[in-house]
Amino acid sequence: MAKEQGRKLIAQNKKARHDYHIEDTYEAGLVLQGTEVKSLRQGRASLVDGFVDIDEHEAWLHGVHIPEYSQGTWTNHAARRKRKLLLNRDEIDKIERRVNEKGLTVVPLALYFKDGRAKVEIALAKGKKSWDKRAALAERQANRETEQAVGRRLKGMHD
């Protein structure tokens, strides 16, 4: 069988970009069981309630839902167990330092296969206030309207 190439997206946390200001992103490997990998290859996972915790200089991913593998037997995994993240010592120390100093949180943004290996993209993030969310939505809407107006103008249509 040929080795997988490229990046195959499994799950994405779109709500995280809405709820947080993303400051830094990191790519981390995951320690998984066999049935978890098979379930991920079927494209089944949810990052909605996920977060990362640094415990004794190790990064752990909590709250990510990977459903049980349908063909699995007694070897099946728990759907919401905590999973170890594979990061460099320097990266873990840097993340831990920034979380403790600035009150940031670490959230998963995407879960994907890269060259056949399961990876998760995590981000240092600061929570948005409700007015921040409204301002971001209004800005996005204004940008969309200006793009549409420019497009209509280029096509020769008038408002």
Image (cartoon, rainbow, N blue to C red):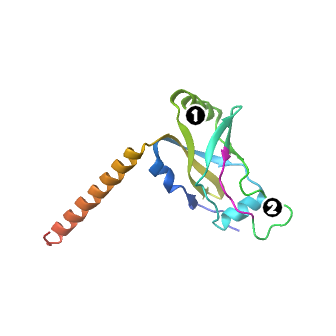
Q: Position of residue 90 (x, y in %)?
A: 61, 31
Say whether residue 115 is left or right of residue 25: right
Q: Quadrant of the C terminus?
A: bottom left
x then y, percent, for residue 4: 63, 63
SS of the residue under disc 2: loop
Residue 6 in view (yes/no): no
Q: Secondary structure at mark 1?
A: helix
Report the side of 74 relative to 103 (left or right). Answer: right
Q: Nearer the viewer, residue 72 or 1?
A: 72
User: On the picture, is 120 further left or further right than 134?
Assistant: right
The x, y position of residue 2, in whole percent, is 67, 66
Q: Amino acid at mark 2?
A: Asn
Q: If the image is split into quadrants, where does the N terminus sit?
A: bottom right
Visible residue check, residue 24: yes
Q: Mark 2 or mark 1: name the one nearer the start of the chain.
A: 2
Q: Which residue is mark 1?
A: 95
Residue 25 sits above or below residue 137 on the image: above
Nearest the viewer among 102 and 11 is 102
Magenta stretch contains residue 67: yes
Residue named by callout 2: 76
Q: Which residues are magenta?
A: 61-68
- Type of amino acid at the residue the image marks with label 1: Ile
Within 10 Å of the Cα at label 2, are there few (<14), some (14-19), or many (20+) other Cα atoms? some
Q: Main secondary structure of the magenta part?
A: loop
Residue 41, position in %: x, y? Answer: 67, 65
